[in-house]
Image (cartoon, rainbow, N blue to C red):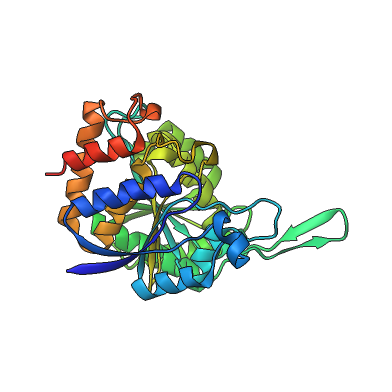
Amino acid sequence: MSYSITLIPGDGIGPEISEAARRVIEATGVKIQWDVVEAGEAVIEKYGTPLPEYVLDSVKKNGTALKGPLTTPVGKGFRSVNVTLRQELNLYANVRPARTMPGITTRYKDVDLIIVRENTEDLYAGIEHRVGRDAAESIKIITREASERIARHAFELAVKEGRKKVTAVHKANIMKLSDGLFLECARRVAQDFPGIEFEDMIVDAMCMKLVQSPENYDVLVLPNLYGDIVSDLCAGLVGGLGVAPGANIGTEAAVFEPVHGSAPKHAGLNRVNPLAIILSGVMMLQHLGEMEAAGRVSRAVTAVLEEGKSVTYDLGGSSSTSQMADAIISKLE
């Protein structure tokens, strides 16, 4: 079987890590026709926007995309490219695993979490305005439809992954209507999954408990803003954003991307760690149903990390981006 997949190389370090991921994925033998499209800061002068329409058209046509980090210019009037992609393609579920891996120094040993973040509304809907000269107001939107949809996605993922517990994270003690509705929806959906334990947790307490005992948690489901914050916290538990993959899932399309930014000061130096986008590629292969290929890449990554010889500077080695990709390819079974 052959797949048509959109590849958005991205800005800064994006092109070099995207190339590393592409080579690793192709080395599995899965047949992919890549539709390479440009987005981000580099195309603004030509198209007047960091997200040209042809990028959206490509993802809609192919249904699957692998994306490098994109830069949204600061102070130039452009909305976040990532947020716009998610909203335009209705990629309602942001899924971010956080797992400890061998060879990566952290304070924890047994973290294995999946963060499921609602991706289309909450304060990130961008509904805000100035109130006179000295105040500004943002409007927090929480709907029953989006809340039930993300809760169901979290429970279905828990079943698929063999997970035991879903924790809904909220601030319903203060925001009784908006977060209260989110919690109400999560509780209702939980009734359809009696085999999965359900609990809820206030977001500030959740942050404390994740630092104290992350091994007690399994799948977390959160509104957009809390999900953004807590998923970075969880990345910190397992080694940082450099090892944090991500997926944005909708009913018609899915975009897989590393969580970290474009790191322009490292652009073109062939020195940054490509793990986050390679692991995002693993998630993409799983999404396509290529479980055998996904498993082979995961095992190859683990083997390279355990060996510790062909890793980049941030992981304690001296290998380049491309050399680390070569090492992973050499370990594919």
The image shows residue 68, relative to residue 318, as above or below, that is below
Name the image quarter holding residue 288: bottom left
The answer to whether 191 appears left or right of 50 in the picture is left
Name the image quarter holding residue 191: bottom left
Foreground: 76 or 86? 76
Q: Position of residue 153 (x, y in %)?
A: 37, 64
Q: Is residue 66 visible?
A: yes
Q: Position of residue 206 (x, y in %)?
A: 48, 43
Seen at 11% across and 44% down, the residue is 333
Q: Is residue 164 visible?
A: no
Seen at 40% across and 37% down, the residue is 270
Foreground: 246 or 213? 246
The answer to whether 48 appears left or right of 33 in the picture is right
* Total numbered labels: 0
Name the image quarter holding residue 35: bottom left
The image shows residue 171, relative to residue 147, as above or below, that is above
Seen at 54% across and 57% down, the residue is 40
Instruction: Please identify the residue farthest to the front as the structure is shown.
Output: 46
Foreground: 82 or 214? 82
Q: Quadrant of the N terminus?
A: bottom left
Seen at 18% across and 52% down, the residue is 28
Q: Position of residue 211 (x, y in %)?
A: 45, 33
Instruction: Please identify the residue farthest to the left as the structure is shown.
Output: 333
Q: Position of residue 108 (x, y in %)?
A: 36, 29
The image shows residue 97, relative to residue 308, as above or below, that is below
